[in-house]
Each structure stands twice: as structure tokens, then as C-alpha cells.
Amino acid sequence: MKAVVKVGTSTLAHATGRLNIRRIEGLCKVLSDLKNAGHQIILVSSGAIGMGVGKLGLPGRPADMPTKQAAAAVGQCELMYTYDKLFSEYSHTVAQILITSEDLADPERSENLHNTLARLLELGALPIVNENDTVSTAEIAVGDNDTLAARLCRSLEAELLVILSDIDGLYTADPYAHPEAQLLRRVE
């Protein structure tokens, strides 16, 4: 089975921006076990900006774009270091893929992304995908990592999409911003 798993910042990090060690260790352990069972896993991971906020000691998530991008640059290093270290403990190789909306919109770039991901899976690597928040400015361009995960799932013809989130399900809108949003019980 091929599965795309998306994990959000609130799952990976505490409100301080510092890593939630217990959760990320548990995630890596479960995904490693799934790989050991013969499944192909693509991880779409948020968290770069949040991790950068913690690593830089900022008082909170920045409001201005240059500081968000700087935090993403610092946080992406921290995030990938952590993933590499934890997955290596279970003898799994990770690969980092940072994309922008243009990588999905342009047919040639989209095909290149698809081919790279497919080959990484053939080679037994675990691709870790995130939007390239250090150069992207619209959100921070794909829309969000939930959408990115769904698009990758479709592109790679994955059998399963798992979204680990602090939201209870799929809504008609962001329930935090729109209290009237309705939970969709079934999606055909």
C-alpha cells in the first residue's frame, strides 16, 4: 500500500514552538513500522516556521513575511535533522522535498516532482514534503499542507491519505475562523 501522511505543526510542536519529542518519536516509530511491513510512505510535514520560532527564541509566530521566511529556513533544518535522526534509528532513509505552487502548476515541474517521488519510493526512501516557505509567500503558496497532501495522494495514486490534525474532520471552512462551518460526514 502507498500512503500519504500529513502532520500539522500543532501535532509536532508545543505552543512555545519547541519540539513535542514524545509525539514526533511516536510518529516516526509508527511510520517506520509501516515501512517495515512493506508499505510506501510519503510524509507531508508542517512545522518549519513553528520550529524556527522556537529555535530563534521568538516570542510568537511572526506577522511579517521576512521573519516567517527566516523562521522557516531555521526550522526546516531543525525539522529534517530530527526526522533524519529518528528514522535512522529504525534504518530508514529520508529525503527532503521542498516545493512551491509553481512545482504543482507547471506541467513539466509537476512531472519532475512526480518522477522524483516515485523513484525515491522505489529506492525505499521516505520522502518528507513541505512547502518551501523560505521562498513562497502565498498560503505561506499551495494553500496549506492538507491540500498539498491530497494533491500528492492523487498524483502518486496512493491508496490512503491520513491527515493528523487538531481539527476533528473535514469542514466546509476553517472552523476556527468560521464557527458556522459544517463537518462533512462523508465525502464521495
Image: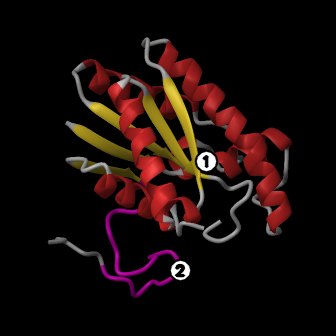
Q: Position of residue 34 (x, y in %)?
A: 28, 26
Specify the quadrant that holds the C terminus.
bottom left
Please state if 24 lies on the left or on the right of 50 as rendered: left
Specify the quadrant that holds the N terminus.
top left
The residue under the point 47% across, 48% down is: 113
Judging from the image, what secondary structure is the residue with disc 2 in?
loop
Any part of residue 66 in sight: yes
The residue under the point 80% across, 66% down is: 65
Q: Which residues are magenta?
A: 165-182
Please identify the dominant SS of the magenta region: loop
Determine whether label 1 and label 2 are within 8 Å by CB: no
> What amino acid is at disc 1?
Gly
Any part of residue 30 in sight: no
Q: Which residue is mark 2?
A: 177
CA–CA distance in space, label 1 to label 2:
20 Å
- Give the crowd class for mark 1: few <14, some 14-19, many >=20 residues within 10 Å: many
Q: Is residue 74 magenta?
A: no
> What amino acid is at disc 2?
Ala
Please report whichever mark, 1 or 2, sits nearer to the chain's N-terminal start. 1
Q: Which residue is mark 1?
A: 47
Task: Answer with the quarter of the image where residue 137 lies.
Answer: bottom right
Judging from the image, what secondary structure is the residue with disc 1 in?
loop
Image color mode: secondary structure
* Residue 62 higher or lower than 161, as above or below: below
Q: Position of residue 164 (x, y in %)?
A: 39, 49
The residue under the point 38% across, 83% down is: 181
Q: Position of residue 94 (x, y in %)?
A: 50, 26
Tag on residue 19? none
* Residue 77 higher or lower than 113, as above or below: above
The residue under the point 31% across, 82% down is: 182
Between 88 and 115, the one nearer to me in the picture: 115
